[in-house]
Image: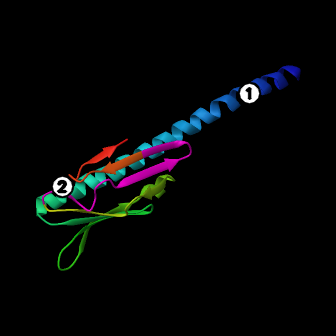
Amino acid sequence: MVELVVALGVAGVLLAFATPPFLRVRDGLAVRQAALEVSTFYQAARHSAIRRATRVRIEFGGDSLRGVYEGITDSVFRAQPGPARHAVAFSASRTVVRIDANGLGFGAANTTIVLRRGAVTESLTTSRMGRLKRW
């Protein structure tokens, strides 16, 4: 009985030391996945603007991402769930970014998107040139 108690005690101590790193890894994977999805969505919308020679409006949100062709009548061409589906917190300095028909950002300069879960944070920043940088 004493051996069993000692073995359970040692297992408990080892588990206590292993749990925080495991949670950080899990949070990091979720944040990286959400950042990849947001940046891929942004790039696809930018390429759509160039391909169709039409201004595109990208609407960022925690629960959804939407790409809209702007014109006389707006047309949603792409929509997908946002970072919230990975339990990742989302904040942005601007929730709407426009990409001109030539691929340049229109009112998008220095838009910062921050994705956070637990102690893990990743930032995405748009430039006036329409590029997106992951930090």
Q: Return the mark for residue 13.
A: 1
Check disc 2: other Cα within 10 Å, few if <14, some if 14-19, many if 20+: some
Which numbered tag is attached to residue 66? Answer: none
Q: Residue at x 22, y 53 (%)?
A: 130
Three-letter residue code for mark 1: Val
Q: Is residue 119 magenta?
A: yes
Tell me: 64 left or right of 7: left
Q: Position of residue 109 (x, y in %)?
A: 28, 55
Q: Residue at x 56, y 45 (%)?
A: 118
Q: Quadrant of residue 13?
A: top right
Q: Nearer the viewer, residue 60 or 129?
A: 129
Residue at left offset 14%, top offset 66%: 54
Lower sequence index among marks 1 and 2: 1
Q: Label 2: which residue?
A: 47
Report how far apart the C-alphas of labels 1 and 2 lie in the structure.
52 Å
Furthest residue toward top: 3
The quadrant the N terminus occupies is top right
> Which is more toward the observer, 60 or 97?
97
